Each structure stands twice: as structure tokens, then as C-alpha cells.
Amino acid sequence: MDTLEELNRRGFVEESIDPTLDLFAEIEKLKKEKNAIILAHYYQEPDIQDVADYIGDSLGLSQEAARTDADVIVFAGVHFMAETAKILSPEKKVLLPDIKAGCSLADSCPPHLFKKFKEKYPDHLVITYVNCTAELKAMSDIVCTSTNAVQIVESLPKDQKIIFGPDKNLGAWVAKKTGRDLVLWNGACMVHEIFSREKITKLKNRHPEAKFIAHPECEESVLEMADYIGSTTGLLNYSIKSDAKEFIVATESGIIHQMEKANPGKTFIPAPPNNNCACNDCPYMKRNTLEKLYLCIKNGLPEVTVPENIIREARKPIERMLDISAKLGL
């Protein structure tokens, strides 16, 4: 077995696996043995989505982490999501298949710099997007997700001054939707920043019947072209309800697996990035694999921990979000 130092350096348990092993069956067996639940984000690879107990976006995953009675939460997602689960269920063991599954958006807002930024606006309430570190949540008044950001801002008095971070694109979209003047932190998600307006225009010309749907983390120039803008769950629901047969999808391509499962007979085309790399795949989300997931449950490692003082402070803004969402029926 690895030492903790080796595990942290590599990020995941490394162990040989019998190639004849049915990993799906083994994972099901381990879940029962350990009273474990697998929560997976829509951006995970299809195999992981298929073995998960719950698949969702950040809001749904937070709600599920808060209500589960499992002893072990295995989070197939990225680090800030596992931290959120630990904050909401501190008595439970929270595992992440690869501890190095980080987030470019969370990295774009270092807590010590945000603290100085916040000090410049002492009369402002701080709303942070859930895609940030536990430390940043602990400095916030309310946490939001892309599903509820607009409604949370609208639930506050019109004269309430607001700092919104870390995603400037989501913040600008929320400001436009609500007519509120938000002070924005200059952060962004590398996946959503890289979609090419020019290439999407060409793709739309080739597929004139296709609906173009986009996540609000995309840049404004891309959002201006969209037929529908919404969270990953919003995009999925739109694809189910719409009569259209073709969709161009501007978000991380992992969601397409669920769209295809829910919509046999409809076609989903990932929106092209502005270069030739697979940049509409999040390299952090894709660090998790079925093999790492199996070894993670089997060994109970890597485990995600959050200091008690951070849990105490970060829990308040997350619970405030969950309360507002519950009242609004989100």
C-alpha cells in the first residue's frame, strides 16, 4: 500500500487490477459492504455516470450530499465538490478517486487575494459560485450554483450591494438577467472560455435546424448566439422538452452522454473550441476513471478532509443557498 505522501503526490491509489474483473459488479458489491453512495457530476466519463447512484449538477449534488444516509460518500467529480460534501456531512467519510482532480475556475481565485478584494468593498454582501475552494466559501455570505444564481440575487433587496465571484462570465450573465450592478472577481473556467464564436457560427450554418444551447460560464459573445442558456441540468431538461432533433452543446462534453440516453433519435454536437485540442473536455473531471473509482472505494482512499473551523464557516453560506433554493422550489 502507498504511503500517504506517495498517494498525495500521485493523487490516486495505484494497484494492479485483474483484467478479467467485472468492475461494475465489484463496485456494486463494495457499495453494499461499505454503505457507500457514488455521486457523479454530468462531466464524468460515461462508465462512471452509469455506475453512479446519483448524477447531477452542483446544486443537485450538494442537495444529495446533505440528505444521504450513507456512511461513505464517493464523489466522482472535482475537489471543491468533495469538499462541499464534507462540509455538509462532516461526520461522513468523503472519498475522491483522484485527489488531483482540481478546477481551473477555483484556481483562478486564490483565497488570500480574494480576502484583499473583499476588504475594498466592506458594505457588499459576498455571493460565491460553488466552483471555489472551501476557504473561499468560508468568506462568503451565500453560495450559489448556475441553477440558482439569478434567483438568489433576485431574492436580495434591490439596494443590496453585491460582490460576485469567482466566475466573471456567470456573474456578467446574472447581472444582465437581474439588472443588478455586481462587483465581479476576474475568474473563469478554461473549458467554457475556449468555445469559438466563429466555429460555432459555421457549425450553425451547416446545421440550420439545430438549437444552440450554452452554459452561462461561456463568454458573452457565445451566449449572445444561444437559443437557450442554463445550468447542466437546465440544458439536459431543455433537450428533453424541445421538439428540435439536433442540438449544438456549449459546455463540457460529458453531459452529452445523459442527453443521448434521455433522447434517443436526437443528435447532440459538441460546440467546437477555438483550437484543435479536446478543450471541451475538462482535464480535471476526466482524471477520474472507473479503475480509480474501484480502487478508491476498495481502499477507502484518497479521503477529502476540511479543517473544522472552515467547515463551521463555509456551512452557513451553503445552507443559506439550500434554504433559498428549497423555498423557490429549485
Image (cartoon, rainbow, N blue to C red):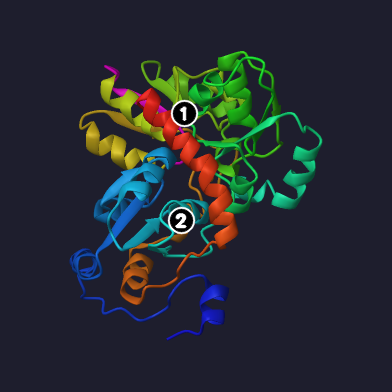
Which residue lies at the image location 31% right of the left edge and 69% below the top edge? 294
Residue 292, x across and y down, in percent:
38, 68
Q: Is residue 95 left or right of residue 178?
A: left
In this view of the protein, which residue sits in the foreground, 46 or 30?
30
Which residue lies at the image location 48% right of the left edge and 64% below the top edge? 304
In this view of the protein, which residue sits in the foreground, 327 or 65?
327
Residue 250, x across and y down, in percent:
47, 32
Q: Quadrant of the C terminus?
A: top left
Amino acid found under the numbered disc labelled 1: Asn
Q: Quadrant of the N terminus?
A: bottom left
Which of disc 1 and disc 2 is earlier in sequence?
A: 2
**Residue placed under numbered mark 2 in the picture:** 82
Q: Which residues are magenta?
A: 242-252
Which residue lies at the image location 66% right of the left edge and 21% below the top edge? 160
Residue 182, x across and y down, in percent:
68, 24
Residue 273, x across and y down, in percent:
55, 37
Which residue lies at the image location 58% right of the left edge and 30% below the top edge? 170
The answer to whether residue 231 of the structure is visible from this angle is no
Q: Determine which quarter of the picture holds residue 61.
A: top left
Secondary structure at numbered mark 1: loop
The answer to whether residue 177 of the structure is visible from this angle is yes
Q: Is residue 285 left or right of residue 233?
A: right
Does the magenta run of residues contain 248?
A: yes
Figure label count? 2
Amino acid found under the numbered disc labelled 2: Ala
Q: CA distance from mark 2 to mark 1?
A: 20 Å
**Residue placed under numbered mark 1 in the picture:** 148
Does the magenta run of residues contain 318?
A: no
Q: Which mark is residue 182?
A: none
Asked if the residue at tag 1 contacts the one at tag 2, i.e. Cβ–Cβ closer than 8 Å, the answer is: no
